[in-house]
């Protein structure tokens, strides 16, 4: 390869490097141009402590708590089951259930769980509404005519 050709290639590489460096410099200047002046006068804080603003009330959709509350019922009488539901859910009065998973005992536990879920609104009408989702399961290890009820509540506003 001749000497002139090599010099020509080197000068092209050097020229490309300089153009790249100039381009980076221009981009840095453009990005700094839209920033506020860090040395500009800022309003000074008053010596009196400002009153804290009241916390805003939460907005948006509700969510469901991750940990369920649980209680057990047993028996076949509808009135007795509704009374057990009412008594067992008393400590959560005023809250609204989002989801209820009921596990009925033995092989026919799914049918028993369905029966218990159908009585939830009779036992605690404000807590269990038509919008509350329920699901019926069976738990083979539990005795017949017993159920474990897991209730997932909506979160409390602001908490």
Image: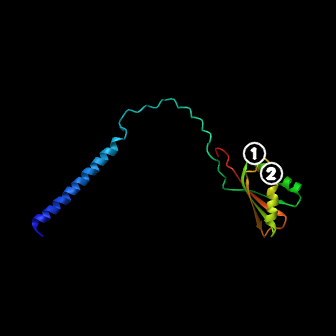
User: Which one is nearer the viewer's eye here, 112 or 28?
Assistant: 112
User: From this viewpoint, which residue is outermost toward the left?
Assistant: 3
**Viewer-nearest of labels 1 and 2?**
2
Label 2 neighbourhood size at 10 Å, few (<14), some (14-19), many (20+)? Answer: some
**Mark 1 and mark 2: Cα distance apart in space:** 14 Å
User: In the structure shown, which secondary structural element does the residue marked by tag 2 occupy?
Assistant: helix
Label 1 neighbourhood size at 10 Å, few (<14), some (14-19), many (20+)? Answer: few
Q: Residue at x 80, y 51 (%)?
A: 121
Q: Position of residue 31 (x, y in %)?
A: 34, 45
Q: Position of residue 2 (x, y in %)?
A: 10, 68
Q: Residue at x 68, y 46 (%)?
A: 156
Read off the residue under disc 1: 94
Mark number, residue 51: none
Q: Position of residue 7 (x, y in %)?
A: 13, 62
User: Which one is nearer the viewer's eye here, 65 or 100?
Assistant: 100
Q: Quadrant of residue 136?
A: bottom right
Q: How is the image coloured?
A: rainbow
Q: Residue at x 10, y 66 (%)?
A: 3
**Is 140 situated left or right of 16 in this image?**
right
User: From this viewpoint, which residue is outermost toward the front?
Assistant: 130
Q: Quadrant of residue 30?
A: top left
- Compared to 146, does 46 lie above or below? above
Read off the residue under disc 2: 121
User: In the structure shown, which secondary structural element does the residue marked by tag 1 occupy?
Assistant: loop
**Is 6 situated left or right of 94 in this image?**
left
Q: Tags 1 and 2 in contact by the CB under 8 Å rule?
A: no
Q: Residue at x 71, y 56 (%)?
A: 68
User: Which one is nearer the viewer's eye here, 61 or 103?
Assistant: 61
Of mark 1 and mark 2, the one earlier in the sequence is: 1
**Is 129 situated left or right of 5 in this image?**
right
Q: Quadrant of the N terminus?
A: bottom left
Q: Position of residue 101 (x, y in %)?
A: 74, 59
């Amino acid at each position: 390869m001749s000497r002139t050709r090599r010099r020509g290639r080197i000068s092209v590489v050097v020229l490309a490097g300089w153009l790249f460096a100039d381009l980076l410099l221009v981009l840095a200047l453009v990005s700094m141009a839209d920033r506020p002046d860090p040395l500009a006068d800022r309003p000074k804080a008053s010596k009196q402590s400002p009153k804290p603003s009241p916390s805003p009330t939460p907005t948006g959709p509700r969510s469901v708590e991750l940990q369920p509350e649980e209680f057990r019922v047993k028996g076949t009488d509808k009135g007795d089951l509704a009374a057990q539901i009412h008594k067992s859910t008393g400590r959560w009065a005023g809250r609204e259930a989002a989801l209820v998973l009921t596990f009925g005992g033995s092989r026919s536990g799914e049918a028993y769980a369905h029966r218990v879920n159908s009585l939830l609104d009779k036992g605690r009408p404000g807590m269990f509404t038509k919008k509350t989702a329920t699901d019926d399961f069976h738990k083979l290890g539990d005795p017949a005519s017993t159920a474990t009820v897991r209730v997932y509540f909506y979160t409390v506003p602001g908490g």
